[in-house]
Image: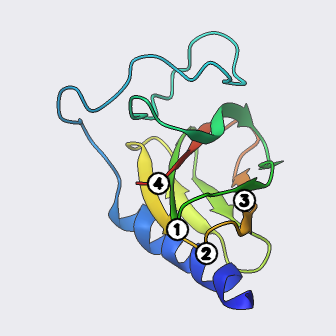
């Protein structure tokens, strides 16, 4: 089972570095945020969230370092949508491996993470600057 803890972050690095998204095709993205979003008001960091998605972690915004609540995927893949605004990079990862670096001020980074079904996942968001704002959402499947 240790293999999953090592492979998932490695795939996260590969996926997020290769899968940043610009403009989406019409009809693919939702304008509305999930009902359980933790941010108050509207977010300025559009995450290009899909319509009718099952949220493992609803859109969460913040600044500074935050450990995301642990979650379980019922499938063998989940998708991370992350974006930041400010100086430098945002680190995203778990405690077992080196985190992925996401450049702030760029397009939303979207990555598919392949894991064993039902394995608990836990990620930490950590910007280089405390003034950097970020948004993240995690959805079930691709």
Q: Residue at x 47, y 36 (%)?
A: 53
How much space separates mark 1 and mark 4, taking CA atoms? 7 Å
Which element is circle 3 on?
A: loop
How much space separates mark 1 and mark 3, taking CA atoms? 17 Å
Which residue is tagged 4? 141
Looking at the image, tell me whether mark 1 or mark 2 is earlier in sequence order. Answer: 1
Looking at the image, tell me whether mark 2 or mark 3 is earlier in sequence order. Answer: 2
Q: Quadrant of the C terminus?
A: bottom left
Question: Percent position (x, y) of residue 110?
Answer: 42, 52
Location of residue 51 by image quarter:
top left
Looking at the image, tell me whether mark 1 or mark 3 is earlier in sequence order. Answer: 1
Q: Please name whichever residue, 78 or 90, is drawn nearer the observer in this view of the structure.
A: 78
Which residue is tagged 1? 76
Which residue is tagged 2? 116
Looking at the image, tell me whether mark 3 or mark 4 is earlier in sequence order. Answer: 3
Looking at the image, tell me whether mark 1 or mark 4 is earlier in sequence order. Answer: 1
Cβ atoms under marks 1 and 2 closer than 8 Å: yes
Query: According to the image, what is the colour scheme of the structure?
Result: rainbow
How much space separates mark 2 and mark 4, taking CA atoms? 12 Å
Which residue is tagged 3? 123
> Which of pointers 2 and 3 indicates the residue nearer the eye?
2
Q: Please name whichever residue, 17 or 137, is drawn nearer the observer in this view of the structure.
A: 137
Crowd tier of the residue under label 1, counting other residues whose Cα lies within 10 Å: few below 14, some 14–19, many 20 or above: some
Question: Percent position (x, y) of residue 73?
Answer: 63, 58
How much space separates mark 3 and mark 4, taking CA atoms? 17 Å
Looking at the image, tell me whether mark 2 or mark 4 is earlier in sequence order. Answer: 2
Which element is circle 1 on?
A: loop
Cβ atoms under marks 1 and 4 closer than 8 Å: no
């Amino acid at each position: 089972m240790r293999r999953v803890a090592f492979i998932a972050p490695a795939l996260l690095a590969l996926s997020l570095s290769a899968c940043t998204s610009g403009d989406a095709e019409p009809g693919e993205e939702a304008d509305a945020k999930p009902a359980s979003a933790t941010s108050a008001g509207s977010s300025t960091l559009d995450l290009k969230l899909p319509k009718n998605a099952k949220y493992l972690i609803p859109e969460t915004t913040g600044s500074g370092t935050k450990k995301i609540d642990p979650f379980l995927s019922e499938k063998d893949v989940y998708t991370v949508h992350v974006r930041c605004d400010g100086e430098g990079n945002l680190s995203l990862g778990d405690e077992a491996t080196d985190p992925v670096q996401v450049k702030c001020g760029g397009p939303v980074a979207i990555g598919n993470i392949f894991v064993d079904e039902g394995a608990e996942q836990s990620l930490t968001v950590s910007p280089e600057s405390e003034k950097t704002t970020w948004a993240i959402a995690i959805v079930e499947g691709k």
